[in-house]
Image (cartoon, rainbow, N blue to C red):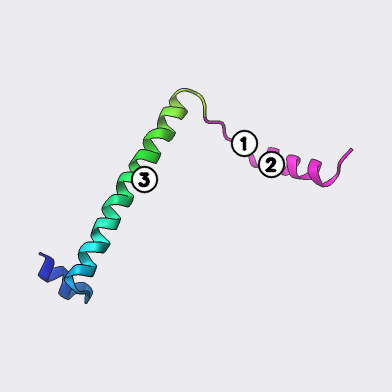
Amino acid sequence: MVDFLSDYYEQDKSSLIKYSLKELYADIIDRQTINEYEKKEKNGAINFIDSNEIMHMIENQSNPA
């Protein structure tokens, strides 16, 4: 499989393995981040702001009273 992928992607085996390991590690980090987000969302700790609210906040910062 490594030989096939090495030929297909035109990379030496070492580079292909390094790339694959980095991608696998990134997948682990992504899953951890998603799990943390989902826990916070379940506990009600996540709060989204409507775009209109953001625009209102920006306008208030631009035009202090």
Closer to us: mark 1 or mark 3?
3
The N terminus - image quarter: bottom left
Q: Which residues are magenta?
A: 46-65
Secondary structure at badge 1 equals loop
CA–CA distance in space, label 1 to label 3: 23 Å
Which residue in the structure is indicated by mark 1? Answer: 49
Find out whether residue 54 is within the magenta segment.
yes
Q: Amino acid at mark 1?
A: Ile
- Which residue is under mark 3? 30
Q: Which residue ends up furthest to the top in the rendered image?
A: 43
Picture quarter containing residue 16? bottom left
Q: Position of residue 26 (x, y in %)?
A: 33, 51
Find out whether the residues at labels 1 and 2 contact each other: C-beta distance under 8 Å.
yes
Q: Position of residue 55 (x, y in %)?
A: 72, 44
Instruction: Give whichever of discs 1 and 2 has the lower sequence position.
Output: 1
Residue at x-position 75% and y-position 44%: 58
* Labels 2 and 3: the sequence-earlier one: 3
Residue toward you, 51 or 45: 45
